[in-house]
Image (tube, grey):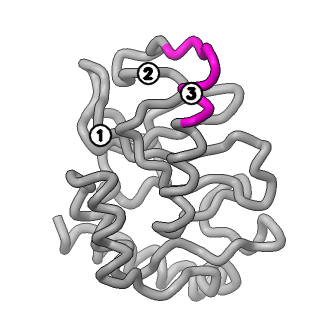
């Protein structure tokens, strides 16, 4: 699996270097061992492919414009620190509010948030847009552990079976 993520992301980086160098320059350097240990404290079963990505790029700098981002809709990969803060905030919102959180699709265990969803990316330019990408460690019966979930105000959908599946930039089914 490590080779798959390396090959896929290498291919993406080569394309971006040629076609979108500004987006490529938004990537942070590698996560430190202590940052990776902090992530594992919150999510002990974090997918190896995602840890490999973080060991090369600990998310992205917060961009000023959507053209500077790697992911669509102005979304950016979160650093470990940012994703833990985002997870804490979502956890608190979910606990403090009576939110209908019943799964709307067979591959989901929830519709809005689940404590075993790792927030890996989102719109940091306009955080109010509610565009988020998650690694799902607690899928519904029709899903895959580690699947990538995209959530916006209008929809929630599965983008990929795993982070290693060409990074979460395309649609796929388990």
- Say whether disc 2 or disc 3 marks the residue closer to the N-terminus: 3
In the image, the segment drawn in magenta is 92-101
| 122 in magenta | no
Residue 94 is tagged as 3
Q: Secondary structure at mark 2?
A: loop
- In this view, the mark in front (2 or 3): 3
Whichever of labels 1 and 3 marks the residue nearer the N terminus, that label is 3
116, above or below 62, in the image: above
Q: Are marks 2 and 1 in contact (CB under 8 Å)?
A: no
Q: Is residue 108 above or below residue 161?
A: above
Magenta residue check for 100: yes
Q: Is residue 66 above or below residue 104?
A: below
Q: Which residue is mark 1?
A: 137
Residue 27: quarter of image: bottom right
Is the residue marked by circle 3 packed among few (<14), some (14-19), or many (20+) residues within 10 Å?
Answer: some
Side of 124 relative to 70 (left or right): right
Left or right, 20 with reference to 139? right
Select label 1 or label 3 by which is in front: 3
The alpha-carbon separation of the residues under discs 2 and 3 comes to: 12 Å
Is label 1 in a helix, a strand or a loop? loop
**Residue 94 or residue 111, whichever sits in front:** 94
Looking at the image, which is closer to me, 47 or 70?
47
Residue under label 2, please give it. Answer: 110
- What residue is drawn where x is 29% and y is 68%? 51
**Quadrant where the image shows the N terminus:** bottom left
Q: Position of residue 136 (x, y in %)?
A: 36, 39
- Asked if the residues shown at circle 1 and circle 3 are in contact, with their CB atoms under 8 angstroms apart, the answer is no
Q: CA distance from mark 1 to mark 3?
A: 18 Å
x, y percentage for residue 85? 55, 56
Q: Residue at x 36, y 84 (%)?
A: 32
């Amino acid at each position: 699996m490590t080779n798959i993520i390396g090959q896929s992301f290498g291919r993406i980086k080569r394309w971006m270097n040629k076609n979108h160098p500004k987006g490529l320059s938004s990537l942070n350097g590698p996560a430190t061992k202590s940052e990776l240990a902090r992530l594992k404290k919150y999510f002990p079963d974090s997918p190896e492919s995602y840890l490999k990505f973080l060991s090369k790029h600990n998310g992205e700098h917060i961009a000023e414009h959507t053209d500077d981002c790697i992911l669509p809709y102005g979304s950016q990969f979160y650093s470990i620190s940012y994703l833990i803060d985002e997870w804490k905030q979502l956890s608190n919102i979910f606990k403090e509010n009576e939110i209908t959180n019943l799964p709307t699709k067979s591959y989901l265990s929830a519709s809005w948030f689940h404590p075993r969803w790792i927030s890996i990316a989102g719109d940091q330019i306009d955080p109010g847009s509610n565009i988020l990408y998650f690694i799902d460690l607690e899928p519904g019966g029709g899903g895959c552990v580690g699947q990538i979930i995209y959530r916006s105000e209008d929809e929630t959908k599965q983008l990929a079976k795993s982070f290693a599946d060409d990074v979460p930039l395309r649609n796929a089914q388990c």
